[in-house]
Image (cartoon, rainbow, N blue to C red):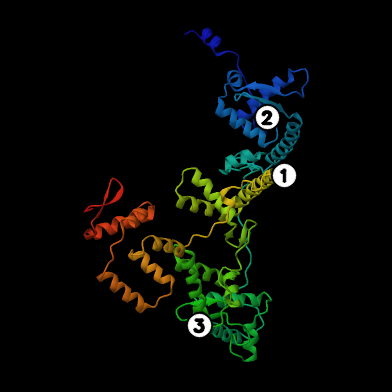
Amino acid sequence: MKLGVLWQYLGCAAVYYPKLAKVTGGVTAAILFWHIFERQSQLCNTDEWVKINVDEVEEKTGLNSTEQRLARKKLLERSLLKERLVTDDNTVEYWADIDALEAQWEGFCQSDSRVSSDNEAKVEAIPANNGDSTKTTAGDASYILGIHIKNDKFFPTQRQPIAVKVTDDYRFNGPWESPEQFEEFQRALLTYFNKHGVTNPTAWVFKIVDGLTKGLISPFWDEFVSGLPLGSTQNPLFIKNEDYNQYRVPWQSAEQFQSFQRALLEYAKTEGFENPSGWVYKIVANIRKGEVSPFWDEFIRGIPLGESQKIKRDWEIEAGVPYPAFEEERIQYYVQKGEPLEQAVAKARAELRDPVLGKDLWEGFLRKCDRIADEAIKAKSLGITTPYLPPSFSDKPQVTKESVMQKLNAIAPQFSISSSSYNSLNNLTLEQQNVEEEESDTVVDVPSLASLQSAYKTAMGRTLVERQIAEHPEWGYGIIDGEVVDLFPF
């Protein structure tokens, strides 16, 4: 290809100002800013925003999308450019702030002039070999002497630190009257900390001595000059327990500490924590660090652990017990979505334990109740004696293990699982239970076909009936096509 044809393909040349690049933050930022400024100056009103497409900028300046994004970031950081998005993703409106550019340009010129004046400093003349003297600049001198002088306002030349004169044979200046007394005090401190099992006794001695030299008051020094044992007039700094040390702990004895740990362990097991011993260790470690623990406050007050930390929410009768109608409403919500009853109960209770989600659901439930109440009042005014209420508003007895076992016992009293549970409800003694178990092992009454058929219709009874029929083939019952039948009717 000929050179003339190549120039035609290349198009018009674009240049940039190197000094402008220092103010805008780089070459790409300078090119983009100057292009926007040119487009802005061509408008009738220079305060108008310039609408430019990304592809158009790339065609005019050669900057791709990545370079344009970095250039806009530099200009936005220096408050030289303002931008706002348009509906089209590739189109952006810009406005170049010329006033901000002038302010930063003046600061740059002032700093540049200071650097130039420093570079023009003269150095001593170096005599030539022929005896003539010549004047050289700082750059010439550095070239002759082999020294590179760096003039950078952001990274100045590191100079040699100034030497500080230190007094020979430095000694601590404190309340002691002689070196012998000072040495005796240090030995007493060292003995005290070794006795109490401190990890690094020498470091503790240094901290106390250093504090005395700075004018701090130390009870250890007061005890030392008074002739008292160290630590006798103050709370023990370290309390020695059986296998470890504790720092300013609130318990008064090892027995009290063990009781507190056992109470924490029982609480963690009751709450179902994954690692009860690890949780107890964290609570005790935080108390040793000086943190306030509500568990310790509850322990010394004699109330159950965690009782004072429970918060009664608006949707709860008491802390942790939601209103039955509200809970039943959430359970029915998941049941209607096709969830099994067990999963519906678990999900509903998990929602009500969440304070944020529970509050939102409670407000929605109140609005629903208000609407239902308005409809019921309107229905009564029209002559309806019993307005409709959702099933969750009906009073239902609480389902417990005892109530379930009573119903199962009423259906099939010969089941071993129901008989043993029913006996526990009547508070039978251990001897009576053993006697009945022996009797049930020796003599088993054959249940009626009707009782087995009625029990087989329930989900829990189906499993029990299948197991009983499999264990007692002598009854003559079997399960055919999902029904309990008599195999020997004659």
Label 3, label 1: how many angstroms apart (C-alpha)? 70 Å
Q: What residue type is labelled 1?
A: Ser
Query: Which residue is pictured at 66% across the width and 34% down the height?
Result: 76
Q: Are marks 3 and 1 in contact (CB under 8 Å)?
A: no
Q: Mark 3 falls on what kind of element?
A: helix
**Label 1: how many residues lie within 10 Å, few (<14), some (14-19) or many (20+)?**
few
Labelled disc at residue 192: none
Q: Do the residues labelled 2 and 3 touch (CB within 8 Å)?
A: no
Label 1, label 2: how many angstroms apart (C-alpha)? 63 Å
Q: Mark 1 falls on what kind of element?
A: helix
Judged by depth in the image, the label closer to the viewer, 1 or 2, is 1
Residue extending furthest toward the bottom: 227
Pointer 1 or 2: first along the chain: 2
Label 2, label 3: how many angstroms apart (C-alpha)? 70 Å
Q: Which amino acid does label 2 sit on?
A: Glu
Which one is nearer the viewer's eye here, 350 or 143?
A: 350
Q: Quarter-wise, where is residue 213 in the image?
A: bottom right
Judged by depth in the image, the label closer to the viewer, 2 or 3, is 3
Judged by depth in the image, the label closer to the viewer, 3 or 1, is 1
Q: Mark 2 falls on what kind of element?
A: strand
Which one is nearer the viewer's eye here, 300 or 473?
A: 473
Is residue 175 visible to us here?
yes
| Residue 129 coordinates in the image, percent (x, y) | 59, 40
Pointer 2 or 3: first along the chain: 2
Which residue has dot 1 on it? 381
Count the marks: 3
Which residue has dot 3 on it? 255
Which residue has dot 2 on it? 83
Query: Can you say whether 337 is above or below 324 in the image?
Result: above
Q: Quarter-wise, where is residue 133 in the image?
A: top right
